Amino acid sequence: MLPKIDLHTHTNLSDGLLSPIQLVQKARDQKLDIISITDHDSTNGIKEATEFGKTIGIEVIPGVEISTDVDDKEVHLLAYFIDIENEELKKYLSFFRDERMHRAKRMIQKLRKLGMRISIDDVLERSKNSAIGRPHIAYTMVDLGIIQNYQQAFEKYIGDNGPAFERKIHVSAQSALKLINDSGGLSFIAHPGFMKENLLLSLIKAGIDGIECIHPSHSENQVQFYKGIVNQYCLLESGGSDFHGGKKADDENLGKYIVGPNVLEAMKKMLQKNNA
């Protein structure tokens, strides 16, 4: 039987529900063989997950998800096979985790001005040691009874056009690609969805290694479209569930959105070529 591979998952060290160990255990329960943990701006869970994975037969590929800015649009990049001990990468991730905290505080201030009884301490109580993001604020708003559900937080308050929205400070795509390359990794456009063609081409020209073709937000037509782009420009493909758990109610996605071993083999060949 071919191995089942999910290259996009999150733990509670970014905006997921499960600890690294719990995630690896759940991956095994869902009959997965290989996963990549791609937390936002954090690689803190990878060592623990990798060691535990070895004890139960799950391979963990080191990854991270980075937010970048391309033509004033936020674009997420997935990095795989990175050296998590790379000093420049560690400095970058530390800086942007700090920036996430500053942004969260500004958003909380805006929510309070809208009459909501919420504090940064409320959010920190729920985020623990995670790289804090909007999902943590949304979860807190639900827990405090400010709103009825997770989606409502984004639709009414903290979504991109909401009254409490605050822009993130982003690294440029070129800088992110250099950072990923210098840390020995491969770079992929995450969940491109309805990304405009000029934006896609801009990233391809900048030197992206591949595109996440399989994702829960992609229709079958989109999957085939992005696979066509991958073939046309001789890129790599990736895919996964983007599993978070909790109030995102995406438990059924883990084990459903997977890639085959040929995808991973192509990545490893590219790494060998880069290191030759």
Image: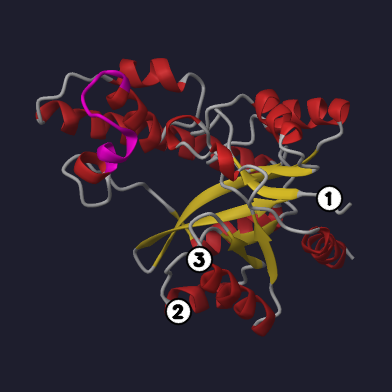
SS of the residue under disc 3 = loop
- Picture disc at residue 3: 1
Q: Is residue 246 magenta?
A: no
Q: Nearer the viewer, mark 3 or mark 2?
A: 3
SS of the residue under disc 1 = loop
Identify which residue, 78 or 88, lies in the foreground: 78
Whichever of callouts 3 and 2 sits on the residue coming sooner in the sequence is 2
Q: Tell me the residue at 75%/50% (across/down).
A: 5
Give the vertical position of 160 relative to 220 (above or below). above
Decide if residue 37 is on the left or right side of residue 126: right
- Counting every numbered tag in the picture gives 3
Q: Tell me the residue at 61%/61% (across/down).
A: 214
| C-alpha separation, residue under disc 3 versus residue under disc 2 | 17 Å
Residue bearing the label numbered 3: 219
SS of the residue under disc 2 = helix
Quadrant (top left/top right/bottom left/bottom right) for the C terminus: bottom right
Whichever of callouts 1 and 2 sits on the residue coming sooner in the sequence is 1
In percent of width and height, residue 245 lies at 52, 33
Identify which residue, 46 or 142, lies in the foreground: 142
Stretch in magenta: 143-154
| C-alpha separation, residue under disc 1 versus residue under disc 3 | 24 Å
Q: Is residue 147 magenta?
A: yes
- Discs 1, 2 touching: Cβ within 8 Å: no
- Picture disc at residue 197: 2
Give the vertical position of 139 relative to 192 (above or below). above
In percent of width and height, residue 47 lies at 75, 29
Q: Amino acid at mark 1?
A: Pro
| C-alpha separation, residue under disc 1 versus residue under disc 2 | 33 Å
Decide if residue 19 is on the left or right side of residue 275: left
Q: Tell me the residue at 82%/36% (across/down).
A: 58
Q: Amino acid at mark 3?
A: Ser
Please tell me how crowded label 2 is: few (under 14), some (14-19), or many (20+) other residues with Cα within 10 Å: few
